[in-house]
Amino acid sequence: SDVVMADQLCGQFFARLLGLPDIVDPEYIQPALESIYDACFVRFNKYAASHTAPQNQKFIGTQTGNFSATGLGVSIGAANGLLPNGFPEDPEGTHQLEVWTGINFGLAAFFAQMDMSDRALEITEAVVHQVYEHGLQFRTPEAITAVGTFRACHYLRPMAIWGIYGILSGRF
């Protein structure tokens, strides 16, 4: 598959965080991060802003918010996995067009770890904006979509935001 996954380098991030040897050849890390940023963040947000039809939500418990990427005019975060052109491999798929808050914070922490803090903060700002501007700060969801749905509130993976703090503050 040609799909670019937002978390495809999470093992590499943890290896460096723990002082272990690289599991990805260093020469491939930055190009892979740039591909993730381009497909899952930049191109996804352009795609999301131009599609008004909701994606098919197949999850019990999906909640509807009062926002949509088409009306916001701002980035909402990095999608889970898209083709290099920013389009979904399967438009009816369930996870690929979702922005998982914890995965985004982990990705941002890896960008910061690789001295790409501008990218880290851009992704973080997009997700934090969605959470705080739409009243989700006391029930941070696992997933946010471009059409204003969210699910799995009170999820623990968003605590990955502390990884960003740890990297940028030099504590990790």
Image (spheres, helix red, strand yellow):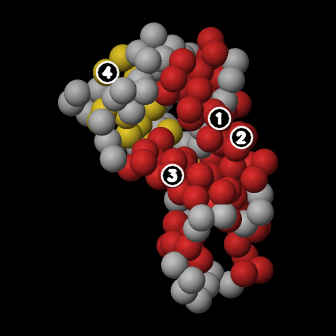
Nearer to the camera, 129 or 46: 129
* Residue shown at the point (66%, 30%) measured from the top left: 75
Name the residue type under label 3. Answer: Trp
Between circles 3 and 2, the one closer to the viewer is: 3
Name the residue type under label 1. Answer: Glu
Q: Secondary structure at mark 2?
A: helix
Residue located beneath label 4 in the image:
63
Residue 47 position (above or below residue 42): above
Residue located beneath label 2 in the image:
122
Residue 125's tag is 1
Q: Could you tell me if the residues under marks 3 and 2 are in contact, i.e. CB atoms within 8 Å?
A: no
**Direction left: furthest residue:** 60
N-terminal of the pair, mark 3 or mark 2, is 2
Which of the image's four quarters has the N terminus? bottom right
Q: Horizontal and vertical percent for residue 162? A: 51, 51
Q: Horizontal and vertical percent for residue 60? A: 21, 30
Task: Determine which quarter of the picture holds residue 55.
Answer: top left
